[in-house]
Image (cartoon, rainbow, N blue to C red):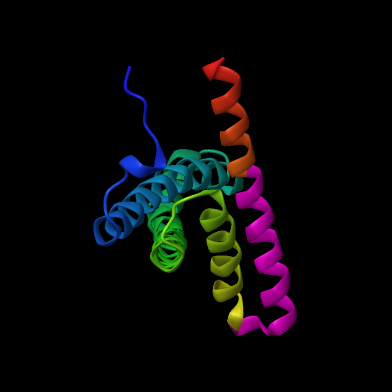
Amino acid sequence: MRNSSIADRDPCPYRIIEDIGGAFAFGAIGGGIWHTGKGAWNSPKGARINGALANCAARAPVMGGQFAVWGGLFACCDCTLSAIRQKEDPWNSIVSGAATGGILAARAGPKAMASAAVVGGVILALIEGMGIWMNNYFSS
């Protein structure tokens, strides 16, 4: 079994493209599942399959695109912080999550931008903390 670490990742220009593609796939698949169920739920009896497929075809690519924008912006922030700080640690991801949340909410005003940045930072801190905990738990 190979021991992978954050240093084993691709260099930044390729990492951004890879993260955009992975985020699009994740969003499109998850959105396809979600919107298929939502389309079936909201369709009248007898037209549930057609409604599910139509809703999936209409909304899943949109959700994939939204995830790709988030993933691309996050990867750009992460690579920028890695270049500025000259190290790759969990703080880059936490700050990148906060920056991504804030940037995506910028059109809604400073209050929404600040709250979205806090939410993005907290979510990424939870993800990074869980990753560190799992790594320590399973390595011993």
What is the tally of numbered marks visible in this picture? 0
In the image, residue 40 sits, relative to residue 3, either above or below, namely below
Q: With 6 as the anchor, is 118 left or right in this view? A: right
Which of 59 and 91 lies nearest the eye of the viewer? Answer: 91
In the image, residue 22 sits, relative to residue 81, either above or below, namely above
Q: With 13 as the anchor, is 116 left or right in this view? A: right
x and y percent of residue 117 in the render? 65, 67
x and y percent of residue 24 in the render? 37, 53
In the image, residue 49 sits, relative to residue 63, either above or below, namely above
Residue 124 counted in the magenta span: yes
Residue 31 counted in the magenta span: no
Quadrant of res 140: top right
Which of 91 and 42 lies nearest the eye of the viewer? Answer: 91
The quadrant the N terminus occupies is top left
Residue found at the far front of this picture: 86
The residue that appears at 55% across and 75% down in the rendered structure is 103
Q: With 60 as the anchor, is 1 left or right in this view? A: left
Region rendered in magenta: 107-126
Report the magenta stretch's main SS: helix
The residue that appears at 44% across and 55% down in the rendered structure is 87
The residue that appears at 67% across and 76% down in the rendered structure is 113
x and y percent of residue 88 in the render? 44, 52
Q: With 135 as the anchor, is 133 left or right in this view? A: right
Which of 108 and 47 lies nearest the eye of the viewer? Answer: 108
x and y percent of residue 31 in the render? 47, 48
